Image (tube, rainbow, N blue to C red):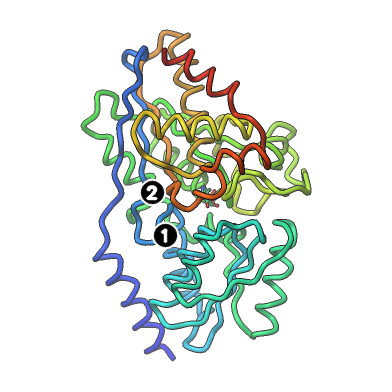
Amino acid sequence: MRHWVNSALSAIEADYQRSADTHLIKLELPNFEGINVYLKDESTHPTGSLKHRLARSLFLYALCNGKIDANTTVVEASSGSTAVSEAYFAKLIGVAFIAVMPKSTSAQKIAQIEGFGGHCHFVDNATQMHAVALKLAQESQGYFMDQFMYAERATDWRGNNNIAESIFRQMSHEPHPIPHTVVMSAGTGGTSATLGRYIRYLGYDTNLVVVDPENSAFYPSYLNQDPSYVTGISSRIEGIGRPQVEASFMPDVIDSMIQVPDLASIAAMLWLEQQTGRKAGPSTGTNLWGALEVAQNMRTQGLKGSIVTLLCDSGDRYLNTYHSASWVAKHIGDPKIYQHKLEEIFQ
Ligand SMILES: Cc1ncc(COP(=O)(O)O)c(C=O)c1O
């Protein structure tokens, strides 16, 4: 069995060697002299999102902890992006994969999971995913990957090409190489944990701001210092915001949080496309709205510096949802007031 684990680890390492790092894109912000905003474009991973990094780390963690062998069915609870990436790695090492997802998950993600040979199991809403995934794993004598539990510890946050190390390396020749602020949203909270730990580990003078959508428990729990805070309702921004605070969310490494209205996330997502031609997913809109708020605060205080955030995944996954005006009007509302705000700021 060790032989099988070794060959699985080799297959993942070979895949890694064939991969390139993701780009750091500099945005042109008129009227923001000396304040530079950058987007780390995680949509260019082979499975289309930042979750490619997490899925690789979770598989390595599970394999090295003796949790997966040739006959293990891997089960995951996911709003879709993690499941797409895990389906890819499951296929790479030849194990069965079941994704437990809300039935609202985008059709493109479902097609990708099935395209990698994964099976999709749907639940009515995000609050049911965990219990169902656990049950399916027990029934199949499989392994529940549990990204919400293990995201923070499966990633080697000190280095080993984690996203934080990559950002700081790519910034090294910029006018303000050490970012004033890094802005990130939270789904598992794993990426913000890695960023916050890395910033502390290397002693950088960088703020970590975590942005959170409406309906999510992360923001109120942070404000009230109450990890048991529960909203019990699903986030309307796919991929981020959770009904309860997840184990991988690390509030102690976060400098501040901003709650972003869901329609502001949509407005920022659409604004990015107007400015750069890049179609991103809605969580990127949340990140960008937060980054623009930080930029405005810096301008008011007369500060110069850089702000880095993430382009988490491509808008191609959401053509029939967040990129459809009629879908947005029906499920979230009218983003016009936030679009006008952006026009005012950048006129
Ligand atoms: C599209 C998208 N954006 C952002 C995130 C947040 O990343 P993390 O899980 O590391 O908090 C996720 C994952 O949950 C996601 O799927």
Mark 1 element type? helix
Left or right position of 324 against 276: right
Q: Residue at x 61, y 60 (%)?
A: 149
- Nearer the N terminus, badge 2 or badge 1? 2
Query: Are there few (<14), some (14-19), or many (20+) residues within 10 Å of tag 1?
Result: many
**Does the residue tagged 1 have its C-beta within 8 Å of any atom of ligand 1?**
no
Residue 258 appearing in the image:
no
Residue 135: where, in percent of width, then height?
A: 72, 76
Instruction: Verify CB contact (< 8 Å) between mark 2 and mark 1.
Output: yes
Rendered position, 60 above or below 36: below
Query: Are there few (<14), some (14-19), or many (20+) residues within 10 Å of tag 2?
Result: many
Three-letter amino acid code at disc 2?
Answer: Glu
Rendered position, 241 above or below 14: above
Which residue in the structure is indicated by mark 1?
A: 52
Q: Residue furthest left?
A: 173
Three-letter amino acid code at disc 1?
Answer: His
Mark 2 element type? helix
Cα–Cα span, label 2 and label 1: 9 Å
Which residue in the structure is indicated by mark 2?
A: 42
Residue 125 location, quadrant: bottom right
Q: Residue furthest front?
A: 326
Residue 180: where, in percent of width, then height?
A: 40, 25
Residue 304 is tagged as none
Quadrant position of the C terminus in the picture: top left
